[in-house]
Image (spheres, rainbow, N blue to C red):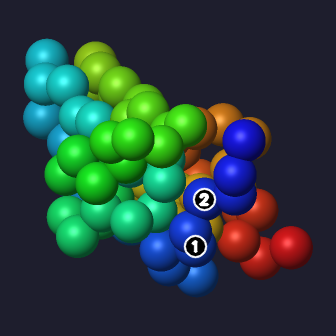
Amino acid sequence: MSEPTRASDKPYIVEVESGKSYFWCACGESKKQPFCDGTHKGSSFTPVKYEATQSKKVFFCGCKITASQPLCDGSHSK
């Protein structure tokens, strides 16, 4: 499996809405970061679904190497 493209050096802060689903870009190539726009097609990457159970701010990973996909775990600072 190839390595994802680092889209950002910090997380994307997004206000999510309870009951909605979000599809996080795992490849790093999407033009709609941090969300998938289908750019991964033909690669080994697939988007990761995030289901919001409550309305709140969420920190989506921008570096794409988090161990807790799709959320930031601080890997960008290592």
Q: Looking at the image, which residue is at 13% across and 25% down?
A: 20
- Give how far across and how far down residue 23 sits, in percent: 28, 36
Please give the label number shown on residue 16.
none
- Give how far across and how far down residue 39 sits, in percent: 28, 54
Residue at the right extreme, as displayed: 78
- Give how far across and how far down residue 46 sits, in percent: 44, 33
Q: Secondary structure at mark 2?
A: loop
Please state which amino acid type lies under the numbered disc 2: Pro
Please state which amino acid type lies under the numbered disc 1: Arg
Q: Looking at the image, which residue is at 46% across and 62% down?
A: 28
Of the 4 image quadrants, the one containing the C terminus is bottom right
Q: Where does label 2 land, which residue?
A: 4
Splitting the image into 4 quarters, where does residue 77 fall? Answer: bottom right
Give the crowd class for mark 1: few <14, some 14-19, many >=20 residues within 10 Å. some
Splitting the image into 4 quarters, where does residue 31 fall? Answer: bottom left
Q: Left of 37 or right of it: where is 1?
A: right
Q: Where does label 1 land, which residue?
A: 6
